[in-house]
Image: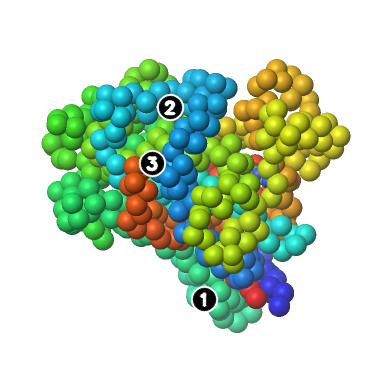
C-alpha cells in the first residue's frame, strides 16, 4: 500500500498546529541552544511538522540486523584485534595528529600495564544509519557510528510530539480526528534504552551489583548546543536507575578528577566513576590542546568502563566500514551467522572502494575520473561536513598527493525517495522536498580481551531529514532536522 499523504491544513489550522508544536517542544525539552546562546535561552529544535513515511518492512529489516551489527564490531575489536591494529597503524600514517594520537594512547596504556587493559569491559552505544535506495526499495547503510551517537534523546521527544499532535486532532483539518494510527508512528524508546545500557555497565563495573553510589561521567564539549539531547539520558539515569551523573569537558578533566588505585573519582565529592561516556572526543576539534589529549590518556588508564574504548572508537572509522563490506571478511568475523541474516547484512551494503594500490583501489582511481556523479568521497572523520560529493571529487583528489588518497574511501551514492514534508526551524516553516536517514541505536557490553558479550540489545530509532538539495544533514550544524517515521505497508 502507498502511504497516506501528509495532512493538508488551512493556514489558520497550520498556525494553530505550529503554536501547539512550539509549546509542546519547549514544555518537554525538544530543544536546542541557538548559536551564541545565553544559558537560560533555548529554542525549539529543528523538526518536521509531520512524521515522514517509511516502509514498515524496511524499518523492521534495520531493527533485525542491529544486534548482529553490534556483534560484528565487537568481533572486530576483540577477536580480530591484530588485524584491526594493523589497519589502524596504516590509518595513523595518514592521520598522525588524530588517529595516530588515539592509537598512541592505546599503546601507552597497554605497555604501562604489562600488555593488558586495566578495564577489559567496554560499553558500546552505537548507531547504524541507513537511507532507502529508491531503485530497489532496500535500506543501505550510510555509516556505523561507535562514538558519541547523538539524537537518542530528541528522537524520543519528537515521536511523543507527533503523537500528541495526532491525538489532539491538529493533523486533521476538518474533524479534529486522529490522522494516523498511533501504532504507525512509533515512539523511539532510545532515551531509556541508552540509559539502560549505561546502567548495565554500572552494574558490571560493580561486580554485578546495582550500586547507586558510583556515578557516570559524561565527557562533553564546551558550549555544546545539543546539550538537552544528552540531558534526557541523564534524567533517565537518575529517575529510572538512581544513578547520578557529572559533566566535564576534556579541558576540565584534570582539575576535577582524582585517580586512586586506578579508580576514577570526582575530586569535589569523591564519588567513584563507573562509566566514562564520551559525547566529545570523536574529532580533532575536541582536542584543543595537549591538555585534552592528556585528559583522554588519564581517563583511558583508569578502571572506569569507557563508552567507547579507544579501539571501539577506531573500529568505527570509515576505512573499517569499507573493509567490512567484503563478503569473505564478513563471514570470517561472524562465523556462526545463518545464511538469512548474512544475506540481510550484505543487502544493506552499497559498494565502497578503497583508494589505495590494491586491485580494487586501482579500479576506483580509474572510474572516479570517468564519472564521478555516482559517488561520495569520505575522509576518516566523524561529525558531519567532511564529505566531498560528485564532480568535486576529481578536483579534490587532484589537489592532494596520490599517496594520501588511501586515507579516503569512495562510496556509491544512495538515492532516497523525496517527500514534501514541512520543516520548522525557530518560527520559520520550510516546505521543500526532504530526504531522510534512519538510525538504529544499539547497546552492547563486552569483554574487549576475550570477546565475551555480556549484553546486546537494539536501543530505539531516529529519523533525521534534510532538504534534498543539500548534500549533508547535520542537525546541530544547521541544515537538517529531527523527524520520526510513519510506518506503512
Ligand atoms: P559523518 O561521519 O560526517 O556523519 P556520514 O558518512 O554519515 O559521515 O556522511 C554524512 C552525510 O552525508 C550523511 O548523513 C548523508 O546525508 C550523506 N551521505 C553519506 N554517504 C552517503 C551516500 N552513500 N549516499 C548518499 N548520501 C550520503
Ligand atoms: Mg553520519
- Report the residue marked by disc 3: 308
How packed is label 1: few (under 14 Cα within 10 Å), some, or many (20 or more)?
some
- In percent of width and height, residue 73 lies at 47, 47
User: Are dots 3 and 1 in contact, CB under 8 Å?
Assistant: no
Q: Looking at the image, is mark 3 or mark 1 earlier in the sequence? A: 1
Residue at point 23% right, 24% down?
255
- Report the residue marked by disc 2: 103
- In percent of width and height, residue 274 lies at 23, 44
Task: Tell me: is circle 2 under 8 Å from ligand 1.
Answer: no
Q: Between residues 203 and 82, which one lies in front from this camera angle?
A: 82
Q: Can residue 387 be seen in this view?
A: no
Task: State the mark number for residue 404.
Answer: none
Q: How far apart are marks 2 and 1 (CA)?
A: 47 Å
Q: How far apart are marks 3 and 2 (CA)?
A: 14 Å
Q: Where the N terminus falls, by quadrant? A: bottom right
Q: Is mark 2 on a helix, strand or loop?
A: helix
Quarter location, residue 403: top right
Judge depth for marks 2 and 1 and give the one in front.
2
Q: Where the C terminus falls, by quadrant? A: bottom right
- Report the residue marked by disc 1: 182
Task: Tell me: is circle 1 under 8 Å from ligand 1.
Answer: no
- In percent of width and height, residue 72 lies at 49, 51
Q: Is residue 458 visible?
A: yes
Judge depth for marks 3 and 1 and give the one in front.
3
How packed is label 3: few (under 14 Cα within 10 Å), some, or many (20 or more)?
many
Residue at point 50% right, 69% down?
186
Q: Looking at the image, is mark 3 or mark 2 earlier in the sequence? A: 2
Q: Distance between the residues labelled 3 and 1?
A: 35 Å
Q: Between residues 170 and 148, which one lies in front from this camera angle?
A: 148
Amino acid at each position: 500500500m502507498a502511504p497516506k499523504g501528509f495532512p493538508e491544513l488551512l493556514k489558520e489550522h497550520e498556525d494553530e498546529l505550529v503554536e501547539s508544536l512550539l509549546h509542546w517542544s519547549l514544555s518537554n525539552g525538544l530543544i536546542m541552544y541557538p548559536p551564541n546562546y545565553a544559558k537560560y535561552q533555548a529554542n525549539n529544535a529543528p523538526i518536521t511538522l509531520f512524521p515522514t513515511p517509511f516502509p514498515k518492512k524496511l524499518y523492521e529489516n534495520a531493527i533485525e540486523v542491529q544486534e548482529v551489527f553490534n556483534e560484528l564490531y565487537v568481533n572486530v575489536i576483540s577477536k580480530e584485534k591484530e588485524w584491526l591494529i594493523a589497519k589502524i597503524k596504516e590509518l595513523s600514517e595518514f592521520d598522525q595528529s588524530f588517529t595516530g594520537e588515539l592509537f598512541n594512547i592505546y599503546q601507552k596504556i597497554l605497555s604501562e600495564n604489562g600488555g593488558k587493559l586495566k578495564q577489559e569491559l567496554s560499553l558500546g552505544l552505537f548507531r547504524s544509519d541507513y537511507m532507502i535506495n529508491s531503485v530497489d526499495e532496500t535500506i543501505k547503510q550510510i555509516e556505523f557510528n561507535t562514538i558519541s551517537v547523538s539524537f537518542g534523546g530528541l528522537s524520543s521527544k519528537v515521536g511523543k510530539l507527533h503523537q500528541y499532535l495526532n491525538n489532539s486532532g491538529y493533523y486533521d483539518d476538518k474533524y479534529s480526528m486522529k490522522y494516523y494510527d498511533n501504532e504507525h508512528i512509533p515512539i523511539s524508546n532510545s532515551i531509556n534504552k541508552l540509559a539502560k545500557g549505561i546502567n548495565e555497565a554500572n552494574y558490571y563495573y560493580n561486580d554485578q551489583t546495582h550500586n547507586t553510589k558510583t556515578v557516570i561521567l559524561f565527557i562533553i564539549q564546551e558550549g555544546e548546543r545539543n546539550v538537552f539531547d544528552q540531558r534526557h539520558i541523564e534524567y533517565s539515569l537518575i529517575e529510572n536507575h538512581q544513578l547520578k551523573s557529572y559533566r566535564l569537558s576534556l579541558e576540565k578533566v584534570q582539575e576535577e578528577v582524582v585517580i586512586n588505585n586506578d579508580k576514577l573519582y570526582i575530586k569535589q565529592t569523591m564519588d567513584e566513576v563507573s562509566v566514562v561516556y564520551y559525547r566529545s572526543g570523536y574529532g580533532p576539534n575536541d582536542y584543543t590542546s595537549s591538555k585534552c589529549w592528556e585528559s583522554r590518556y588519564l581517563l583511558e588508564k583508569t578502571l572506569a568502563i569507557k563508552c567507547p574504548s579507544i579501539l571501539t572508537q577506531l573500529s568505527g572509522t570509515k576505512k573499517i566500514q569499507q573493509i567490512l563490506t567484503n563478503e569473505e571478511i564478513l563471514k570470517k568475523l561472524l562465523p556462526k551467522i545463518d545464511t538469512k541474516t548474512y544475506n540481510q547484512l550484505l543487502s544493506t551494503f552499497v559498494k565502497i572502494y578503497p583508494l589505495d594500490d590494491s586491485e580494487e583501489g586501482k579500479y576506483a582511481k580509474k572510474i572516479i575520473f570517468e564519472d564521478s556523479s555516482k559517488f561520495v568521497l569520505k575522509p576518516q572523520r566523524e561529525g558531519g561536513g567532511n564529505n566531498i560529493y560528485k564532480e568535486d571529487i576529481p578536483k579534490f583528489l587532484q589537489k592532494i598527493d596520490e599517496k594520501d588518497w588511501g586515507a579516503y574511501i569512495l562510496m556509491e551514492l544512495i538515492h532516497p525517495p523525496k517527500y514534501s514534508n514541512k520543516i520548522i526551524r525557530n518560527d520559520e516553516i520550510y516546505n521543500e522536498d526532504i530526504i531522510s536517514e534512519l538510525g538504529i541505536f544499539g547497546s552492547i557490553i563486552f569483554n574487549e580481551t576475550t570477546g565475551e558479550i555480556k549484553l546486546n540489545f537494539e536501543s530505539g530509532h531516529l529519523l533525521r531529514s534534510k532538504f534534498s538539495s543539500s548534500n549533508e544533514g547535520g542537525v546541530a550544524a544547521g541544515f537538517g532536522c529531527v523527524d520520526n517515521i510513519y510506518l506503512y505497508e
